[in-house]
Amino acid sequence: MSDYLSLSEAELRKYVIAHPDDEDAFQHYMEIVRAKPGRIVVKTTEQLIEEIKKRMAS
C-alpha cells in the first residue's frame, strides 16, 4: 500500500500499529522519526540513565 505516503505522522503511526506486517510503511515512519531534530540515540542502559538525569536536571 502506498497510500501511507499521504498520511500525517499521527495517522501513519496508527496505520503502522494496525498493520504490523507492512514493512514499507514502517520504514517510512522510521525515516520521519529519525529526521526529527534533537533526537538522542542511546545504545546502553547507562547512556539512557545519564540522558534521563540530564533532562530531569534542566
Image (cartoon, rainbow, N blue to C red):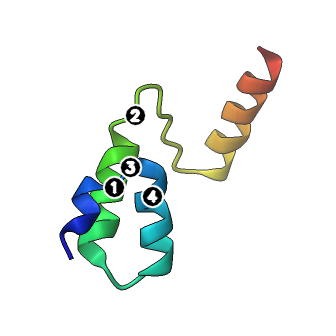
- Quick one: label 1, few (<14), some, or many (20+) residues within 10 Å? few
Q: Position of residue 37 (x, y in %)?
A: 41, 26
Quadrant of the rendered image containing residue 6: bottom left
Q: Mark 1 points at which residue?
A: 7
Q: Which mark is residue 44?
A: none
Indicate the amino acid at tag 2. Lys
Q: Which of marks 4 and 2 is in front?
A: 4
Q: What element carries label 2?
A: loop
Q: Position of residue 53 (x, y in %)?
A: 78, 29
Camera-near label (3 vs 2) is 3
- The type of residue carrying mark 1 is Leu
Cα distance between the residues tagged 1 and 4: 6 Å
Q: Distance between the residues labelled 2 and 1?
A: 17 Å
- What residue is pinned by disc 2? 36
Could you tell me if the residues under marks 3 and 4 are in contact, i.e. CB atoms within 8 Å? yes
Does the residue at mark 3 contact the one at mark 1 (Cβ under 8 Å)? yes
Please name the residue that numbered disc 3 is placed on.
8
Instruction: Name the N-terminal-most of marks 3 and 2.
Output: 3
Labelled pair 3, 2 in contact (Cβ < 8 Å): no
> Which residue is found at the position 47% from the left and 34% from the top?
39
Give the vertical position of 44 relative to 17 (above or below).
above
* Secondary structure found at label 3: loop
Q: x, y (%) of residue 22? A: 31, 79
Disc 1 and disc 4 in contact, CB within 8 angstroms: yes
Say which quadrant the N terminus sits in: bottom left
Sooner in the amino-acid sequence: mark 4 or mark 2? 4
- Cα separation between marks 3 and 4: 5 Å
Q: Residue at x 45, y 58 (%)?
A: 11
Furthest residue in direction bottom, as rendered: 21
Say which of 43 and 35 sits in front: 35
Q: Name the residue under label 4.
A: 11
